[in-house]
Image: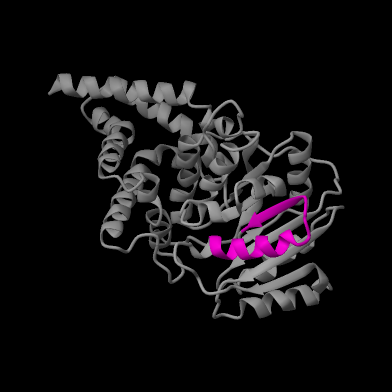
Amino acid sequence: MSEIILGLSIVSLSIWIYLLLFRGRFWQMDQRLPEGTQRNASVCVVIPARNEADLLPVTLRSLFAQSYSGSLQIILVDDHSTDGTAEVARETAATLGKSEQLQILSAQPLPAGWTGKLWALEQGIQKGMEREPDYFLLTDADIEHDAENVRDLVSHAIEDDRELVSLMVKLRCVSFWEKLLIPAFVFFFAKLYPFRWASNPHRSLAAAAGGCSLIRREALTRIGGVAAIRQALIDDCALADAIKSTGSRRIWLGLTPTTISLRPYDSLDTIWNMVSRTAYTQLNYSPLLLVGAVLGMFIVYLFPVIGILTGSLISLLTYLLMSLSYFPIVQFYRCSFWYAFCLPAIAFLYLLMTIDSAIKHWRGQGGAWKGRTY
């Protein structure tokens, strides 16, 4: 038994040394959008909105308040809302004297083979194509944009010649469950898709954050629009892969502390549903990959705690390296540094969410979002 514990301790430590030194420095969380200069490129913002009346007065206002010198038109696609989303959007624009800047579309019935969000985006993009904008900004209805966000996105896209510039917006992190689990959500994403690697044209790995993605119109046209990924549940990464694999391979992904999501995840249940909705999708619905993920999570995150309880100094070192790697994202979210030492418990919860995601898929309940199941 002691030989097994020693062997697993060495494996776990080796994995963490690799992650810290050779995984694109994902844990540093230092990829930030540089401050840009004013550009005159035209931008069409497309917002898919399904029952977002509560958030739109804030998030839509943030787009109207952009300090951007170029043309900025906004298309909101009302995806069969029942809470007056379209009316709230119209009233918000009228109050600010921005009615001419906003166009509201009522989504057509969802056809077979499409997810709701992508079908809404498709309709907004097709309408926006009539204006032939230089860029499309695809953003969620819960995102409050910093006043310089569009300026900085466009500036970076032009100056660094990027076909896609995407931001992982700062998620809401107020309640206990948000502080415990939301930073880890970003941490695990960055580990799977190191931002430096996604932004490197010499690497095939591609990733984006669907809440805020600026895309060159020609690149979107080249891949056949979002119709090319119409069935994707993890649509942001699928879009990034389609763009990077067919063109200049020049995409960019980073973090932002100033453009934020207002979506509340103030209970374990809401975060659980968010993660389990697509976790098994990430594993390509493969039982073998699920088994591998369970074993991997156990060895990487949980075994060091077991090793410490048996007196293993190697496991103690592993645990300290693990906590060190987690600290930057904890700091980014302004949480107490003690959360950095909770990663094994956090990983255990995410492991349970992943297993639950597979169970829901097998039961035909996977991909549930706002009354739809894919």
The residue at 47%/31% (across/down) is: 325
Give 7 or 316, whichever is nearer the viewer.
Answer: 7
Give 324 or 296, whichever is nearer the viewer.
Answer: 296
The residue at 42%/62% (across/down) is: 270
The residue at 65%/49% (across/down) is: 220
The number of discs equals 0
The residue at 29%/19% (across/down) is: 10
- Residue 288 higher or lower than 84, as above or below: above
Give 313 or 278, whichever is nearer the viewer.
Answer: 278
Q: How far from the left and from the top, in percent, is residue 240? A: 57, 43
Give, as a single range, the part of the protein colored magenta: 118-139
Residue 60 is drawn in which quadrant?
Answer: bottom right
Q: How far from the left and from the top, in percent, is residue 299? A: 28, 32
Residue 23 is one of the magenta-drawn residues:
no
Q: How far from the left and from the top, in percent, is residue 35? A: 77, 40
- Residue 191 higher or lower than 314, as above or below: below
Quadrant holding the N terminus = top left
Relative horizontal placement of residue 146, taking residue 206 as reference (left or right): right
Q: How far from the left and from the top, in percent, is residue 244? A: 59, 37
Give 112 or 172, whichever is nearer the viewer.
Answer: 112
- Residue 295 higher or lower than 278, as above or below: above
Quadrant holding the C terminus = bottom left
